[in-house]
Image (spheres, helix red, strand yellow):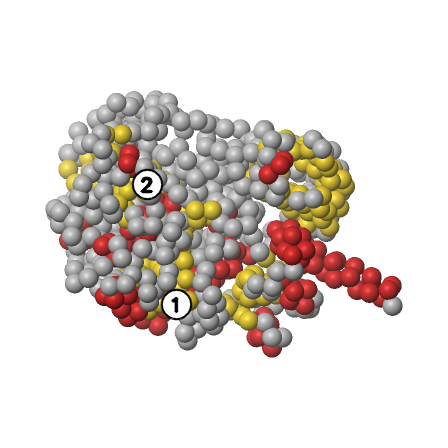
Amino acid sequence: MNRIILLLLLLAGFVFGQKADAYLRFQQRPALAKGESAPFRVLVKGSEGLAQELSQEGFEVQSDLGRMATVQVTRQQLSRLLSMNDVQRVTFTPPKKLYNSKAVNYENVQTAYNAGYTGKDVLVGIVDTGIDFYHPMFRKENGDTRILYIWDQTLSGSGPSGTSFTYGVEYSEAQINQDLKSGSPYSVVKQKDVEGHGTHVAGSAAGADPNASPPDTLHGGAKEANLIIVKTSLQNADIIDGINYIFTRASALGKPCVVNLSLGGQYGPHDGSDDDSQAINALTGTGKIVVYAAGNDGNKKVHYYKTNVVSSDQIQFSYTDYVNVWIEAGDDLTSASLSWDGGSISNVIKGTYKVSGNVQLSVDKASSANNNEIAVAVFIDDTTLSSKTFTLTLNSLSDKNNNGTITRHGWASDDAFLDPYGAFSQGTSYGSSDYPYTLSNDACAQDVISVGAFISRENWPASDGYTYHYTNSGKEGGIAGFSGIGPTADGRNKPDIIAGGQIVLSAKSSFISVQKELLPPAPFTDDYYYTQGTSMAAPVASGAIALLLEKHPTWNPDAVKEYLFNHAQGTSATTGGTPAEVKVKDDPNNWDRVFGYGAIDLTDAFGPDAIDHNAPPIVTRFTLAQNYPNPFGEKNQTTGNTTTIRYGLKTSGQAEIPVQLIVYNTLGQTVKKLVDRQERVGEHTVVFDAKDLPSGIYFYTLQVGGHKLTRKMILLR
């Protein structure tokens, strides 16, 4: 009998090790010892119809995502969940970190307001630390709330009514208004934003203070949008549920919606293949857009990278919550070891893990990951080791691909690697070195809009009468030193765009205290404060994207990105900085790893020369970029009278497509036919020489079949 029990225990441990995410395995060590029974949520991957099977087995399914689902379980139920044949992997990742006005002006939102788009017919969702619903930015002129729903996932309850979610407490618009009028704050709605992050974020996206003087001066981009708020636990499955919940409520109301996530982390492969990224991709669609902060690690040593062929690799790092290293698909290693002064874990082979005190080392097989890469993970939860240096050794590496490389990408939860991937200069005289591949893992998902931060405010007036600035923080228009830098691990172009994110003024929760230097002058001292981060840039972008969705409610993520990429604007430095000192985005619509495609610009969507992107064939079949440089002409000593026009031909089902690219003057007369031929699918470039033309405004039109796109260019002599 004892042998049978031992065999069953070993089998259970084997199943747990094979199917459970490395962090989930680590979290069971202290939790099982304490016998905790509190429910929590995990992300489960399996086969089609997974949610139905899980429900039949008695598990509480929260979000049905096809081959994935979020499930509420207790610690004691995990073994039964992991033993199910159709369950391939169960994920519970480290809690996401929070990536902790004037900024909206840079996006030219006024052109949208002038055209009548203010957010009235679109919803903005925020998944964050909650919201101070008493703040004037989220109330109408009559005092009623602009918030339709709040779901507090952290409170004990039965979940939102009429949904699959069975945890937390939901508050309706009527309940919020009841609390606001009760004279007894928080007697009806118990949700509070005690950290303040979510309140500031919501203000930047869709806040508007009706009492501001002068009027209409304190607001986010979608200043008349209604909001749906999720106060989250910051765990991966709960965040996914939060996104799903917001889109579910928005669909019931028949409105398009943008969901902002100003949070993330460095745990994962950074290639969009992980289950979290795939789940979020699955939730996006027509009228469903997710915006993610790029992360605040651009100037930190959070990334390790080597490609050389060696028999072993020793990776040194300081104390950090976790390190995860990914080995090029097809290549191999035999085991991994970890050592530090006073301890070690030796020879962990693929498909196993070992624990020493509060330190765990695991090595997952390539077959355990969607990208077929071996993953090595270290987790540390022991502050007595905070002064130690750790050495992770990858043993017996082999170039099974025979391509002369063994690529190793590694990420740490914080500034930890002693020998990171080489830093580069952004062309700035301020700040420290900057590091590629430092985007948040979540910002690498294919269908999210990833937003970096530029300096939207260099100096700020404070409540004590002084004007402040951060020493060596850069010039307005330059990149924020902390902004996460691309590309993704699989080489895709991320971040997508940038928005103002340094010294952003927005709503202050009444539950937080802020130093006087970060409070604005009266009369706004009590309700607002300045802060910075890609957390602040993301909602600035979300507000602008909400205005795009209000005009184009059927746009999906590809259509939104199509506009953002081809209609971005550059940035320019304020006086006092030379080009050698301050790197700015001077070539919009061309991607680079720091600025993405450039800063959001709504002018072309809402201005007098607005281009109609509503027809699906235009969005899905071809693109036309802004010419570069623009303006151009003899005053530009680099390019002279020439400018470059790029266009892309996408899926059409044809080997070749009839294409015309024609330049017109303001009278509609043809100036020059640049292209008139059959073109293959792909990216194309044409150089236009205007040496015989006078200064003025010209238009160039790309025609593919019966569809056209037109852009404006300026020739200056």
Say left or right for 505 vs 73: left
Residue at horizontal 19%, vertical 35%?
715
Q: Are marks 2 and 1 in contact (CB under 8 Å)?
A: no
- In 3D space, how far apart are the residues under numbered discs 2 and 1 (Cα atoms)? 29 Å
Instruction: Report the front residue among 492 and 172.
Output: 172
Residue at horizontal 51%, vertical 56%?
236
Q: Position of residue 316 (x, y in %)?
A: 63, 31
Instruction: Report the front residue among 65 and 699.
Output: 65
Q: Nearer the viewer, mark 2 or mark 1?
A: 2
Q: Is residue 678 visible?
A: no
Amino acid type at image mark 1: Glu
Residue at horizontal 39%, vertical 67%?
170
Question: In this rendering, is residue 147 above or below 460?
Answer: below
Residue at horizontal 75%, vertical 46%?
349
Q: Position of residue 447 (x, y in %)?
A: 44, 55
Would you identify the image quadrant in which residue 83 lies? bottom right
* Marked residue nearer the N-terminal end (2 or 1): 1
Neighbourhood count class around disc 1 (C-alpha, 10 Å): few under 14, some 14–19, many 20 upward: many
Which residue is label 1 attached to? Answer: 170
- Quarter of the picture holding the N terminus: bottom right
Amino acid type at image mark 2: Val
Would you identify the image quadrant in which residue 457 lies? top left
Query: How many discs mark residues in the rendered view?
Result: 2
Say left or right for 495 vs 340: left
Which residue is label 2 attached to? Answer: 514
- Quarter of the picture holding the C terminus: top left
- The disc at residue 315 is none
